[in-house]
Image (spheres, rainbow, N blue to C red):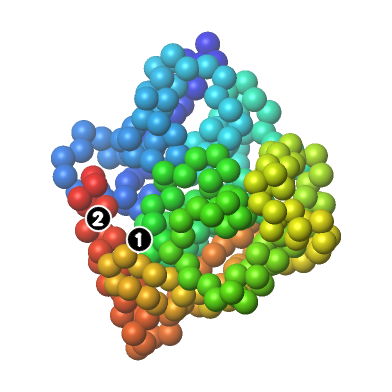
Amino acid sequence: MAVTELGQALRRWRDRVPPDAAGLPSGGHRRAAGLRREELALLAGISVDYVTRLEQGRAVNPSVQVVEALARALRLSGDERTYLFGLAELVPPGPDVVPAFITPSVQRLLDRLVDTPVAVSDAGMTLLLANPMYAALMGDPSVLRGFERNGVWRNFTGMPTRVRHTAEERRDFEAGMVAELRATTARYPADRQLQALVAELRTRSQRFAELWDAGVVGRLAGSRKTIEHPQVGMLTLDCDLLRVEENDLHILVYSAEPGTEAAEKLRLISVLGTQSLVGRG
């Protein structure tokens, strides 16, 4: 019974989210005003087949991570998120786990920044949500799975990135990330996912292990970042890290000073990104 109710709730919530509100193109022939299954799958970072099976009651026992991702993609309120967890026969993560819920107020803030590259991560630096401008600037994050969505993992395991650091900038950035992650593990010592991330990183990266064993605790600061975009070339942007203390979220915002070459390139990336989304839809 719970699985059937889960499917009905997912369909109902999917139908009420306008695609443009989620940063997706709304043109073309659509049978419903809400999200298509493939669009929900894209936003939640899961397969279309799995969304279909959940809605049809053919999939059972979705993970906490999947339910949390669906709640974000469907823009659920706090009460609706709790209800979704109940339908999935799960308990919402408690205060001993890194929060991954994006509140409606934060979502409204992101909706206003449509022309600005913005990404939201949890306190462990795992990407929760990125707007289309961020995807156009940094590459589509919807293809990332598991630990690949974590910024520390991507930086210390050599995953491709468009950010270009000098040797000194890279050393400082790596030290800042490890210091931030250590502070987060101290706040959430019972978070098993966080423990697994640290353990795997210590195995995969000697540099991470050295920094971790140094025991530095601190906060990652904003900075200026040079990005090599495949179509517009190099541009240097301000990268500000805003913290939502109540929910322990990180909002990463990229911007350029008006009237500069970087601002013009960012405007061009916005146009190119929109064309890419329309083509994909």
What residue is shown with label 2? Answer: 276
Q: Counting residues from the N terminus, which is met first, the one under dot 1 or under dot 2? A: 1
Residue contact at pointers 1 and 2, CB within 8 angstroms: yes
Labels in figure, total: 2
What's under tag 2, amino acid-wise? Ser
Disc 1 packing (10 Å; few <14; some 14–19; many ≥20)? many
In the drawing, does residue 45 fall left or right of residue 281?
right
Q: Secondary structure at mark 1?
A: helix
Q: Residue 262 — which label?
A: none
In the drawing, does residue 19 fall left or right of residue 156?
left
Task: Identify the residue at image location x=29%, y=72%.
Answer: 232
What residue is shown with label 1? Answer: 136
Farthest top residue in view: 1
Tell me: residue 139, above or below residue 237: above
Farthest left residue in view: 29
x then y, percent, for residue 127 = 54, 51
Q: Secondary structure at mark 2?
A: helix
x then y, percent, for residue 176 = 69, 67
Task: Kindly tell me whether residue 99 is visible in this rendering.
Answer: no
Farthest front residue in view: 206
Tell me: residue 15, above or below residue 249: above
Farthest bottom residue in view: 259
Task: Identify the residue at image location x=57%, y=19%.
Answer: 61
Q: Quadrant of the C terminus?
A: top left
